[in-house]
Amino acid sequence: MSSRAPSTGLPTIIQGGMGVGVSGWQLARAVSVTGQLGVVSGTALDVVHARRLGDGDPGGELHRAYAAFPVPSIAERVLDRWFIDGGKEPDEAYRPVPMFDTRPVRARQALTILANFAEVWLAKDGHGGKVGINFLEKIQIPTPHAVYGAMLAGVDAVLVGAGIPTALPNLLDRLSRGDRVAYRVDVEGDTGTTEVHLDPAEWVPPDPSSAVGSRLDRPAFLAIVGSHTLAAYLAKDPDTRPDGFVVEAPVAGGHNAPPRGRMTLDDSGQPVYGSRDVVDLDKMAALDLPFWLAGGHGRPGGLPAALAAGASGIQVGTAFALCAESGMSPALRDAAVRRALDGELTITTDPYASPSGYPFKIADIEGTLSDPERHEARRRVCDLGFLRTAYERPDGSTGFRCPSEPVEHFIAKGGRPGEPEGRMCLCNGLMATIGLPQVRAEGTEPALVTLGDDAPAVVQALTAGIGPRPWPAAEVVQLLLGEG
């Protein structure tokens, strides 16, 4: 079976870029060394690194990667601010990271660039395999600095979903040339144009004798889409045309595209997807761009079926989220596997949980936010703010609100009454899932686990094909290729 797709030079298997931190550098590297595309999650990577530094950087891997950054003074300033030698006390809170706004402070920008550089650098270290990075279009403000950091480390592919990423091709083109960029940010009610600016020369001064700081390799761009209509829209204009697509079905984990048309819920309160939500693969093929199928293909037989349907390969999330190198807390990973083997694991597509407005998959794991009592008992707080919505205030300035923040704050900022109902704090919940929960006076933030609808079947397939857990990522790849 061929292991490379046409046009982009990317492999047939793409490991899902699962955030926050589930797809860390360890997982991406383990997949990449097999010849497939390992992908790190760029979501909230700055906070992930700040908290790892706050834990004392166990193993010293971040220090090792930061030492490779082309401007040592930037790495030194980040370490001075965030590193705690020996780590914080278990009952001590992590140092807060300033939330992004449309004029982010330079220290936050530096942390973003460095974290994305280091994560990709570690994933690529010591081998010649390809590594990608995944971002959410919904989280726009840190994107230019995050992409720039990843490109400084030689990232091979950038994948973006949860929105319509029309600006990414131009962003990659300009950063590869070392040009100054202005990246538009969506602001509700904005009568003008709100932008985030980045000048590469202000971070890494141009060096005529080196590609670093001047021209950078331009990574492939894959747009994650849920419909052939969106794919056709992006492909028709050279300014928005990606190098390929990941076509994600509604059964995939994490955020899902909402059903087309009016939202209808079934008796269990989950969105109903119909024939309009089935992607026409013949129309995808007619766009003459490679595409990978995501959602429901992460077990034996999935890859041959995708190739037979005209796809270049598959993107796999759940199987890798449950493997040994996953960033998910081992206790949560084991609980999910155990419940799946016992026939008790349920996955719910919650239309309201995510502040983004997109449906979100939630795995039923005891002690997490999937427990309604645990969710209701959590005090509402918004101190990470990645999924906030920017809006224009009456005075023309830009404000931010989140339906998961305290309800009175959301309403005072012009939010619609009723919108906060059922919302969860994904930012804090997903940070807890990878073992980096914030500690508060009332207790530690609870975790939130997301997996694909087929998680029980994936666990059964991995158990039958590989054996008892933990499942090394390399053996998962072999099983998916039919070599296990």
Image (spheres, helix red, strand yellow):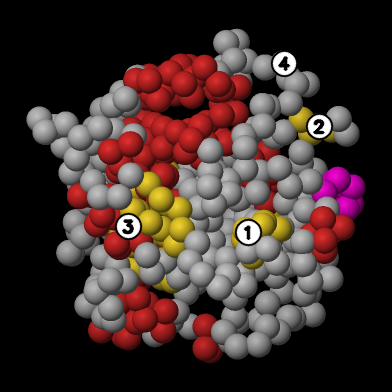
* Residue that carries the numbered disc 3 in the rendered image: 171
Mark 1 packing: few (<14 Cα in 10 Å), some, or many (20+)?
A: few
| Residue labelled with disc 1 | 397
> In the image, which residues are magenta?
373-380
Q: Percent position (x, y) of residue 42? A: 46, 46
Counting residues from the N terminus, which is met first, the one under dot 4 or under dot 2?
Answer: 4
- Mark 3 vs mark 4, CA separation in Å: 41 Å
Report, in whole angstroms, how far the alpha carbon at label 3 lies from the one at label 2: 39 Å
Q: Work out how far the residue at label 1 is from the one at label 3, CA to CA, in angstroms.
A: 25 Å
Instruction: Inspect the image, locate mark 2, and give the three-letter code of the amino acid beneath it.
Output: Arg
Residue 129 lies in what quarter of the image? top left
Q: Quadrant of residue 370?
A: bottom right
Which residue is drawn at the image coordinates 60% and 10% (left, top)? Answer: 86
Mark 3 or mark 2, earlier in chain:
3
Residue at numbered disc 4: 89
Q: CA distance from mark 4 to mark 2?
A: 13 Å
Element under disc 1? loop
| Front residue (pair 26, 297) | 26
Q: CA distance from mark 4 to mark 1?
A: 40 Å
Please name the amino acid that badge 4 sits on.
Glu
Cβ–Cβ below 8 Å for labels 1 and 3? no
Determine which of the numbered discs, if any, sits on residue 440 in the image: 2
